[in-house]
Image: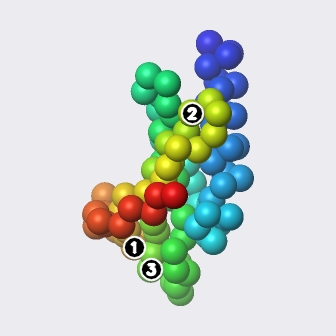
């Protein structure tokens, strides 16, 4: 159990260190971390555009796929205003490298 928690925290830290260099945005939160076979999927949210009031901030949700060796790819899943919880707009953008 402790090994699992440590690995989840490691994946969170790895993605957190990649968000700004790859997206040019600061990490807002990490809503999910899952493992499928030999890869990890880490979903993060970043503030795409700040607004006043902050409920109007535009939040982008991204999925990063990682192996134990490093990042495999990432893509933007959706955009929403911070106040519109549960009302995401899917995007067709694939920001893979």
Q: Which residue is mark 3?
A: 56
Q: Dot 2 lies on which element?
A: strand
Disc assigned to residue 35: none
Task: Tell me the distance, in whole angstroms, between the alpha carbons under discs 2 and 3.
Answer: 35 Å
Residue drawn at 46 percent across, 58 percent down: 96
Disc assigned to residue 81: 1
Q: Dot 1 lies on which element?
A: strand
- The crowding category of the residue bearing disc 3, from other C-alpha atoms within 10 Å (few below 14, some 14 to 19, many at least 20), is some
Q: Is residue 40 left or right of residue 87?
A: right
Q: Return the disc, 3 or 1, that comes first in the chain's sequence.
A: 3
> In the rendered structure, are the residues bearing label 3 and label 1 in contact, judged by CB atoms less than 8 Å apart?
yes
Task: Tell me the distance, in whole angstroms, between the alpha carbons under discs 3 and 1.
Answer: 5 Å
Considering every residue shown, the one lying at the far front of the view is 97
- The crowding category of the residue bearing disc 1, from other C-alpha atoms within 10 Å (few below 14, some 14 to 19, many at least 20), is many
Does residue 62 appear in the picture of this structure?
Answer: no
Q: Dot 3 lies on which element?
A: helix
How many discs appear?
3
Quarter placement of the N terminus: top right
Residue drawn at 55 percent across, 81 percent down: 50
Q: Is residue 10 left or right of residue 38?
A: right
Question: 50 or 69, which is in the foreground?
Answer: 69
Residue drawn at 44 percent across, 22 percent down: 37
Residue drawn at 63 percent across, 59 percent down: 19
Q: Quadrant of residue 22?
A: bottom right
Residue 92 % position (x, y) = 29, 65
Q: Nearer the viewer, mark 2 or mark 1?
A: 2
63 relative to 80, above or below: above
Residue 17 % position (x, y) = 71, 53
Considering every residue shown, the one lying at the far top of the view is 1
50 relative to 40, above or below: below
Disc assigned to residue 67: 2
């Amino acid at each position: 159990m402790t090994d699992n928690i440590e690995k989840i925290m490691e994946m969170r830290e790895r993605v957190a260190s990649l968000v700004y260099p790859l997206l040019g945005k600061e990490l807002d939160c990490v809503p999910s971390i899952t493992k499928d076979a030999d890869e990890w999927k880490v979903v993060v949210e970043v503030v795409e555009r700040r607004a006043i009031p902050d409920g109007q901030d535009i939040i982008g949700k991204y999925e990063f796929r990682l192996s134990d060796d490093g990042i495999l790819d990432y893509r933007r899943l959706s955009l929403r205003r911070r106040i519109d919880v549960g009302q995401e707009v899917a995007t067709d953008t694939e920001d893979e490298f």
